[in-house]
Image (cartoon, rainbow, N blue to C red):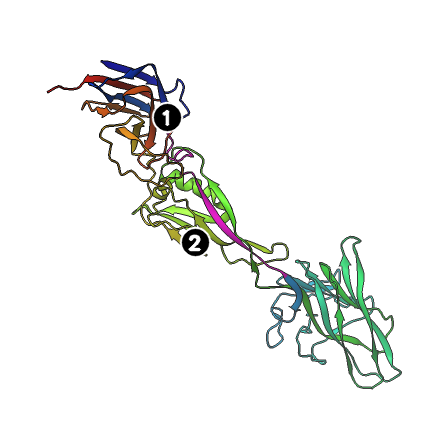
């Protein structure tokens, strides 16, 4: 007697990795009968993505260590003759003279120095002298300072915070009573569009007769970002000529420590389910790994994949104290599909991506979603099917007995057809059959969900031979 069962998987079990065939009437055998099972034919539209949650090859992790820096404030030389003058005190930059506004300007890097004096009326002359040197020359390198009619401005495009200003002032020959001279160091306030005083000092020049110098360092204890500074004399009338012979400044800088490595954070990378070829797989990985500055590439000769760590040396700033990608490790699950996809034969829990270098896979990538569809049953075969299918996947349930091993490595959206031309059938020991469960796996022992399949299964009741 033959029992035929025709199953359309979409009917009840579309989103399951199994089918239960509930027989209308149980099949029973007596002592002189036995049963055989046969998969007659099978058809399936190959619409299973080659990268998907079903195949457990669409997720891996990034273990990322960040490094956090702290800082204190220090200072460094900001304004000197470097870039402005050579060793012979010759001007290296152009002097821009504006006779209308009575100014002479020189610029280097982010600094512009402006000297204002009512005597600046000839654009063929040079009015700047090297007072930016640490070596003072009272005879040849001096610039006159007079209340309201001459002063010096320091302009910075980076809003640098000047913390100290080293100055030397010089008077020429004078005989008389001591004279107090007030010098002011101001900053420009962008909120009020006016200069406000940082510090003023009184320098006393005695009646020594000959030339005389006074040294003073202006300090700015709690500097704010400022685009322009001004140095001027506020004493109205002087019985001698007053010059500035030295002008050098220090600026505030943050001094960073060596940083502290933070606890690692695990980030999950999820590749959207889909049909991928090598180029689209690479492009999608690059898109997902952008924030980690990791770039993948595939070698045209051996099809090995590279994960390049494109992070460059991190330089902390006050506004950015965290090196997000200090150390990056790939965390690839020990799942055969994922390992084959990436060409990894030597599994490691953590694969470090060297700084400014790369990790290359052990062998070629393999994006075939599955080579076989394995159909199993819970029926008890008299001769158990032998298999050495890969074990160890986390949701593996155990196989049971294999009814068919069907080629499936074909292009997406083609039909997988199986016809039992060899008339294979299997003797079963079951004496009572009321339900038959079929399960579906790939060759990596992963359960797969076929959302469409047409199956013809057959049970035969046969008589035992008598001798």
Residue 11 visible in the current orientation = yes
Tell me if 326 is positioned left or right of 71 in this view: left
Q: Main secondary structure of the magenta part?
A: loop
Which residue is disc 2 drawn over?
352
Q: In this orientation, which residue lies closer to the viewer: 364 or 77?
A: 364
Tell me if 285 is positioned left or right of 124 in this view: left
Furthest residue in direction front, as rendered: 31
Q: In this orientation, which residue lies closer to the viewer: 270 or 22?
A: 22
Residue range in magenta is 46-70
**Is residue 416 within the magenta segment?**
no
Is the residue 106 above or below the residue 300 in the image?
below
Label for residue 18? 1
Query: How far is mark 2 from mark 1, CA to CA?
Result: 40 Å
Badge 2 crowding class, 10 Å Cα cut-off, few under 14, some 14 to 19, many 20 or more, is some
Residue 106 visible in the current orientation = no
**Is residue 51 within the magenta segment?**
yes
Mark positioned earlier in the residue sequence (2 or 1): 1
Tell me if 361 is positioned left or right of 231 in this view: left
Can you tell which quarter of the image residue 165 is in? bottom right
In the picture, the quarter occupied by the C terminus is: top left
Q: Secondary structure at mark 1?
A: strand
């Amino acid at each position: 007697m033959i029992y035929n069962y025709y199953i359309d998987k979409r009917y009840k079990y579309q989103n399951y990795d199994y089918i239960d065939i509930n027989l209308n009437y149980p099949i029973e055998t007596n002592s002189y009968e036995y049963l055989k099972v046969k998969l007659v034919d099978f058809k399936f539209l190959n619409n299973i993505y080659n990268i998907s949650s079903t195949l457990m090859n669409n997720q891996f992790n990034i273990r990322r260590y960040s490094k956090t820096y702290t800082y204190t404030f220090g200072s460094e030389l900001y304004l000197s003759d470097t870039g402005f003058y050579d060793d012979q005190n010759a001007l290296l930059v152009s002097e821009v003279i504006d006779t209308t506004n009575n100014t002479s300007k020189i610029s280097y890097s982010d600094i512009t120095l402006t000297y204002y004096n009512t005597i600046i009326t000839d654009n063929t002359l040079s009015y700047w002298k090297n007072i930016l040197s640490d070596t003072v020359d009272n005879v040849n390198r001096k610039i006159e300072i007079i209340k309201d009619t001459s002063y010096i401005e320091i302009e910075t495009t980076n809003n640098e915070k000047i913390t100290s200003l080293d100055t030397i002032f010089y008077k020429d020959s004078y005989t008389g009573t001591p004279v107090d001279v007030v010098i002011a160091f101001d900053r420009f306030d962008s909120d009020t569009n006016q200069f406000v005083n940082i510090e003023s000092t009184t320098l006393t020049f005695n009646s020594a007769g000959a030339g005389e110098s006074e040294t003073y360092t202006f300090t700015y204890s709690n500097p704010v970002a400022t685009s322009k500074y001004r140095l001027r004399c506020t004493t109205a009338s002087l019985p001698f000529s007053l010059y500035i012979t030295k002008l050098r400044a220090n600026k505030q800088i943050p001094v960073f420590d060596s940083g502290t490595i933070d606890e690692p954070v695990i980030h999950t990378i999820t590749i959207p389910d889909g049909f991928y070829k090598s180029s689209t797989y690479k492009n999608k990985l690059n898109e997902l790994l952008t924030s980690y500055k990791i770039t993948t590439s595939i070698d045209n000769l051996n099809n090995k994949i590279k994960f390049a760590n494109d992070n460059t040396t991190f330089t902390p700033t006050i506004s950015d104290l965290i090196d997000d990608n200090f150390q990056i490790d790939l965390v690839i699950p020990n799942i055969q599909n994922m390992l084959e996809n990436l060409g990894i034969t030597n599994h490691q829990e953590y694969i470090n991506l060297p700084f400014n270098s790369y990790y290359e896979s052990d062998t070629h990538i393999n994006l075939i979603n599955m080579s076989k569809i394995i159909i199993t049953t819970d029926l008890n075969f008299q001769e158990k099917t032998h298999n050495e299918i890969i074990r160890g996947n986390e949701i593996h349930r155990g196989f049971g007995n294999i009814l068919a091993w069907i080629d499936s490595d074909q292009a997406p959206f083609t039909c997988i057809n199986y016809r039992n031309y060899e008339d294979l059938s299997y003797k079963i020991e079951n004496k009572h059959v009321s339900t038959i469960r079929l399960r579906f796996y790939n060759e990596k022992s992963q359960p797969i969900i076929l959302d469409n399949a047409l199956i013809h299964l057959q049970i035969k009741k046969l008589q035992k031979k008598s001798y």
